[in-house]
Image (cartoon, rainbow, N blue to C red):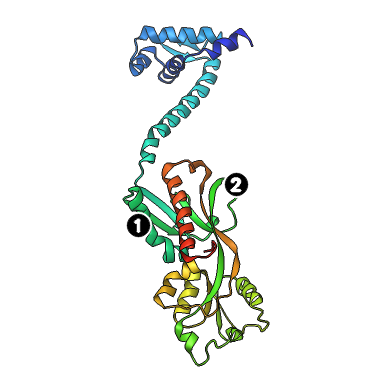
Amino acid sequence: MTKQSNNMNRLELGYLRAFEAVARLGHVGAAALELNLTPGAVSQQLRKLQSSLAVELFERDGRRIRLTPQGSELRRTVTAALDDIGSCVNELAAKPELEQADSLRVSVPPALGVAWLSSLMFDFCQSFGLTSFKMTAALDVAQIDWRQTDVAITYGAPPKEGFAWRFIATVKLRPICSPALLNSAAGLRSLADIVDQWLLHEDDGTEWRRWLSAAKIRRVPQHNAYFGTLMMAIAAALEGRGLALVSDLLAQDYLKSGRLVRPYDIGVEATRSYYCICPESRAGEPLIERFMDWITSTSQVAYALRGQPQES
C-alpha cells in the first residue's frame, strides 16, 4: 500500500465536511459560519486534506476560490457519500419509532379474512397494545401492494426470493351446502346424488374433479358455476344454490350456526397452502415478528381444538 493510500485512509470526516462546504459556498468564511468553526480552522482542515491527497483542490479567483478539476471530481464523490451518511443516520434515528409502532397493516385472502382473521385481529391488538390495524384483501403475492402492507397471509406456493415466510397450514377441502338443499326433495340421499346438483367453483374446476375422484364418483357433473372468489361460492351455497368445497377453518362459523352443513365427510388436500409472509428486509421488525409468531401459534391451537391435523 502506498503512502498516499495510507494518508487517505486516515482522512477525518471533518476535513471532508469542510471541503464540501467550501466547495458548495465558494468562500471559507461562509463555510466556517455554517460549520460553526473559525475561518482559520476551516483553512487548516483544507490544507491537511490537500496534503493528505497530494493534489490541489482549489485555486484563487479574486477574493473567491474555485475548484480545480481534481477538486470537482472529489466534490461529486464527497457530496454523494455525505448524502448517504445522512440518509442512514435518519433511518437509524427513526427505528425506535418503528419499534414502538401501534398499528399494523395486514393483507389476507378475502374468505380467510371474513371467516377467521378479522375477528382475531382485535385479540392481537389487545395482547400487544396496538391501537389500530388495517386489513386489505389479496389472494397471492402478486396482488399485494407492499407500499400499504406490513405483513400478509397468502394462499398458494411458498414465496420466492425476497420474502421471509412462515408456513401456516395445508388446506383440506370438503363439500358444504345449506340444510334446505340437503333436505329438499331433490336433495342428497346418496353420494352419487352430488353430480345432479350445482357444483360451485372458485377455480377452473380442478379441486372438484379431485374430490369426485377421491369419492370414486364417475359420473360427470351437469351443472357448474364458476366464481372469482371463494366468498361468492359460499354465498351461493348459503342461498341453497349448490355445493362448495370449503375447509373446516373457513366453514366453522357457518357450520356452528347451522347455516351450512357437511353432507359428506370425504376431504381432499388442496393444491395450495397458507403462508404468512413479509419483505425479507423487514423480517426483523419486532411487531412483524410478533404477528408471525402469533398467527402461527393461533392457527395451530385452532386445529388442535378441532382434534384434526393441520388444515385450513
- Front-most of 205 and 261? 261
Give the farthest residue toward the bottom.
185
Residue at (40%, 57%) from the top-left corner?
Answer: 135
The image shows residue 197, relative to residue 232, as above or below, that is below
- Seen as rendered, the residue at the extreme front is 307
Residue 118 as seen in the image, left or right of residue 69: left
Residue 24 occupies quadrant: top left
Q: Residue 48 versus residue 200: which sits nearer the camera?
A: 200
Local crowd size for mark 1, using a 10 Å CA cut-off: few (<14), some (14–19), many (≥20): some
Horizontally, is 224 left or right of 255 in the view? right
Task: Identify the residue under disc 1.
Answer: 122
Q: Is residue 269 visible?
A: yes
Residue type beneath disc 2? Glu
Helix, strand or loop under label 2: loop
Residue identified by numbered label 2: 161
Q: Is residue 78 above or below residue 96?
A: above
